[in-house]
């Protein structure tokens, strides 16, 4: 293994071939301080380059910063325009025999997936040929906007994609051109990119990282075996298919015909992921990809980048000089930090496979895609784009003819057209599903909610849904319907959980599902008894025995869910309702599984911060991972409110946000005074374990059920606990807590990826690939 450190010494860089003419100014000479070979980039800083000098990789990939200052290297095919002479770029690949050629008219534009200075990426449906109905991503490049070098890279990307066939690399199905544009027809990968998921999850579990990096290692090894250096490894270029497996994409900066002895001297890639030998331009080979692999591993484990300065120069200095290990103060095992001190040597991926961090991976099963991914992207209709930026998907898809760059433009890309044999042989076309599969099974393709039900008044309104009372017209029976806006939330997880576990007597039953394309309709039982909190506040007196019976019923249901690997994550009183007015604990139903998740494993952590006012665990406030313990915290808050008559962390509407947040974050609550003077010690003991600030020391649902206050509830006293004369004070305390959480600006030590300056620059589209 080779030490993971920048090269030392100040030897002169190897001579570089003369660069082709460029409209952009050449980089200035390196400053004296950059004795290690630091190359200062013109136009540096956080902006990422704009105007005519700013570009994406061919096709306008938007989500990362790439800089390119690349001399033409030995053996690199290229063409240039000199004094008006247009020279052809030769390509050795040709259309395969027996395959049908494609053209733009064979594809229906559905949505815009991305856009850059060179063109757009569309979601399209094939409307002719044996693969009619198949969804693809169509990358459309405007020839007139491509510099000569970008044209070379576009054809290089096309050639690499034709040559590569690997389960973890995106597949090229068609390539064709018109007078003004180039077209690459690729896999449509519904899961979006890893950066999007990483931004939402703050950081991944170590098992997540191990799985994604193992698949990525196999993809890189395949490229390296073909003599290809990838050179632009970053989360935005790693996409997820509908099953959750990775696909490496965007080969615009890749370099062919490189081995361990031969080096490339290009200064290209995304600065924060560049290897030291790329930064100092002393020559690099496949080993540079393994450096980027390590940077990516660091980012996925911690949610931050290891090398990130206030501008590009500082970032590059950090890459050349920074000691990395001290930064890795995260939850990762001892094996994970060790990896950062190593980089693959001549044995390539075999050294990666032997590393202890990957010791649990079955590489043969992994290659055959037989290992279940840790995350399956949201699914709905085949053309749904939940995981893509709505800034683009909301646009009307248009593909204009495009202006040719010259009279000989078509000849510039001679041999560009390509049709994959598998485009005809491998596709098994199934009927298009414009609605959720479960809805199709229930009602076919044409049934509408309004054909069977009559809508009545609102029951509740949320940020992405509304709940209404409805009448089944055929039977005149009353139900509730939750109407979910599909553009705001994917309800697939909620539907799956209700279908799977809704037969439990204390979980709301899903009766029917409809999908009209814009909204999902979940028809459920109508909870005529109202919310649990309203019921408690209406009662003048409430005994410990009654509180224990209520908690027993709810905890028993939560224990059932947890044993099935499901966490609710939103167990506030408004989501716990009575089926009827009997006041019987058996009529309690747990409702609204909109935030519920099915755990990925015994130690899987849910990392998306979701909370509701008082019913939030302190580790969520700290934006750290939390698991099923957060449900127990919420039940502890509920128990406290039932016994005390007020919430534990906000006593009234006049509490300041700082006071509320301090109590929540520290687990500071009172068990003395008022009702607490008569509440049993067993109840207080149970509460202290359910509201423990450390989730690892907090009781599980099973432990709650075994506690004497629950197990021996028949022996609890009947005497009545006092209720507040003004229930609005409790609701005011709730409102104060909501306000405190909504207005609080968190400053966690370990920030989410989306909070980093790199992510902010990416989101402003200023950190796209830049040709300098």
Image (tube, rainbow, N blue to C red):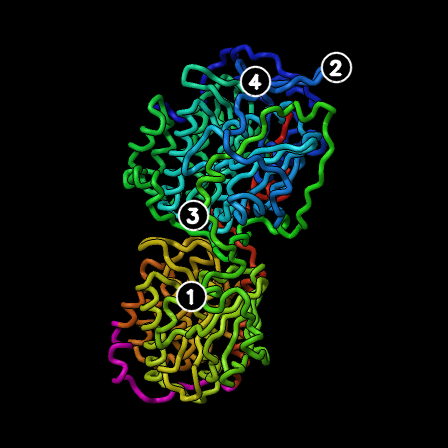
Q: Which of these two is toward me, 569 or 191?
A: 191
Instruction: Determine contact: label 2, label 1, CB under 8 Å.
Output: no
Q: Residues within 10 Å of mark 1 (few under 14, many from 20)?
A: some
Distance between the Cα atoms at labels 1 and 3?
A: 41 Å
Q: Find out whether residue 723 is within the magenta segment.
A: yes
Q: What kind of element bears circle 3?
A: loop
Q: What kind of element bears circle 2?
A: loop
What are the residue bounds of the magenta stretch?
706-725
Q: Is residue 699 above or below residue 714?
A: above
Which residue was labeled with disc 2? 83
Which residue was labeled with disc 3? 244
Q: Which of these two is toward me, 644 or 554?
A: 554
Q: Residue at x 44, y 43 (%)?
A: 302
Q: Find out whether residue 591 is within the magenta segment.
A: no
Distance between the Cα atoms at labels 4 and 2?
A: 20 Å
Which residue was labeled with disc 1? 668
Which residue was labeled with disc 4? 77
Instruction: Determine contact: label 3, label 2, CB under 8 Å.
Output: no
User: Looking at the image, is mark 4 or mark 1 earlier in the sequence?
Assistant: 4
Q: Which of these two is toward me, 430 or 82?
A: 430
User: Looking at the image, is mark 4 or mark 2 earlier in the sequence?
Assistant: 4
Q: Is residue 382 left or right of residue 625?
A: right
Quarter of the image with the N terminus in it: top left
As drawn, the label of residue 382 is none
What residue occupies the far front of the structure in this picture?
98
User: Looking at the image, is mark 3 or mark 2 earlier in the sequence?
Assistant: 2
Instruction: Determine contact: label 1, label 3, CB under 8 Å.
Output: no
User: Looking at the image, is mark 2 or mark 1 earlier in the sequence?
Assistant: 2
């Amino acid at each position: 293994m080779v030490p993971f450190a920048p090269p030392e010494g100040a030897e002169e860089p190897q001579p570089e071939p003369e660069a082709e003419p460029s409209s952009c100014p050449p980089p200035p000479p390196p400053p004296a301080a950059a004795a290690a070979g630091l190359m200062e980039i013109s136009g540096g800083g956080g902006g990422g380059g704009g105007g005519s000098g700013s570009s994406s990789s061919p096709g306008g990939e938007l989500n990362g910063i790439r800089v390119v200052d690349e001399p033409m290297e030995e053996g690199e095919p290229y063409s240039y325009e000199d004094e008006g002479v247009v020279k052809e770029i030769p390509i050795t690949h040709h259309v395969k025999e027996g395959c049908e050629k494609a053209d733009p008219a064979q594809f229906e534009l559905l949505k815009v997936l991305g856009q850059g200075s060179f063109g757009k990426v569309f979601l399209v449906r094939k409307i002719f040929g044996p693969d009619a109905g198949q969804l693809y991503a169509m990358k459309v490049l405007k020839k007139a906007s491509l510099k000569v070098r970008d044209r070379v890279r576009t054809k290089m990307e096309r050639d690499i994609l034709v040559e590569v066939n690997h389960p973890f690399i995106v597949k090229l199905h068609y390539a064709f051109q018109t007078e003004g544009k180039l077209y690459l027809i690729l896999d449509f990968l519904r899961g979006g990119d890893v950066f999007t998921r990483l931004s939402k999850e703050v950081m991944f579990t170590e098992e997540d990282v191990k799985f994604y990096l193992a698949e990525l290692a196999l993809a890189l090894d395949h490229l390296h075996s073909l003599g290809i250096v990838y050179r632009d490894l970053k989360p935005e270029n790693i996409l997820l298919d509908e099953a959750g497996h990775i696909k490496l994409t965007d080969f615009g900066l890749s370099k062919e015909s490189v081995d361990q002895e031969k080096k490339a001297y290009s200064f290209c890639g995304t600065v924060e992921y560049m290897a030291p030998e790329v930064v100092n331009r002393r020559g690099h080979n496949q080993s540079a990809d393994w450096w980027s692999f390590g940077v990516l591993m660091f980012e996925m484990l911690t949610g931050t980048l290891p090398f990130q300065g206030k501008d590009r120069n500082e970032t590059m200095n950090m890459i050349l000089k920074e000691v990395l290990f001290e930064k890795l103060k995260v939850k990762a095992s001892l094996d994970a930090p060790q990896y950062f001190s190593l980089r693959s040597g001549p044995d390539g991926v075999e050294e990666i496979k032997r590393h202890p961090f990957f010791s649990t991976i079955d590489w043969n099963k992994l290659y055959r895609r037989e290992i279940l991914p840790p995350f399956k992207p949201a699914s709905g209709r085949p053309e749904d784009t939940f995981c893509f930026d709505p800034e683009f998907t909301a646009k009307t898809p248009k593909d204009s003819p495009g202006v040719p760059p010259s009279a000989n433009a078509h000849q510039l890309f001679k041999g560009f057209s390509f049709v994959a044999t598998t485009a005809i042989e491998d596709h098994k076309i199934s009927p298009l599903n414009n609605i959720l599969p479960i809805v199709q099974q229930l009602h076919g393709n044409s049934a509408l909610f309004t054909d069977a039900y009559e809508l009545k008044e609102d029951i509740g309104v949320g940020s992405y849904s509304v709940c209404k009372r409805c009448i089944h017209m055929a039977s005149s029976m009353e139900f509730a319907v939750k109407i979910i806006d599909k553009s705001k939330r994917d309800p697939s997880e909620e539907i799956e959980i209700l279908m799977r576990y809704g037969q439990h007597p204390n979980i709301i039953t899903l009766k029917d599902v409809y999908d009209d394309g814009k909204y999902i309709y979940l028809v459920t039982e109508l909870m005529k008894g109202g919310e649990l909190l309203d019921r408690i506040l209406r009662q003048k007196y409430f005994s410990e025995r009654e509180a224990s019976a209520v908690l027993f019923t709810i905890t028993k249901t939560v224990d059932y869910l947890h044993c099935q690997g499901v966490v609710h994550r939103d167990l506030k009183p408004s989501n716990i309702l009575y089926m009827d007015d009997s006041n019987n604990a058996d009529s309690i139903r747990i409702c609204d599984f909109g935030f519920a998740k099915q755990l990925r494993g015994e130690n899987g952590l849910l990392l998306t911060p979701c909370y509701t006012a008082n019913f939030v665990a302190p580790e969520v406030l700290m934006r750290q991972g939390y698991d099923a313990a957060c449900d127990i915290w919420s039940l502890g808050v509920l128990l406290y409110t039932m016994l005390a008559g007020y919430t534990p962390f906000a006593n009234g509407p006049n509490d300041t946000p700082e006071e509320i947040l301090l109590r929540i974050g520290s687990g500071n609550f009172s068990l003395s005074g008022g009702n607490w003077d008569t509440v049993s010690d067993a109840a207080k003991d149970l509460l202290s374990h359910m509201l423990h600030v450390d989730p690892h020391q907090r009781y599980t649902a099973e432990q709650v059920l075994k506690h004497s206050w629950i197990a021996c509830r028949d022996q609890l006293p009947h005497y009545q606990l006092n209720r507040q004369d003004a229930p609005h004070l409790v609701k005011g305390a709730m409102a104060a807590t909501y306000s405190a959480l909504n207005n609080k600006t968190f400053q966690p030590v370990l920030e989410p990826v989306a909070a980093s300056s790199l992510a902010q620059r990416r989101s402003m589209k200023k950190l796209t690939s830049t040709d300098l």
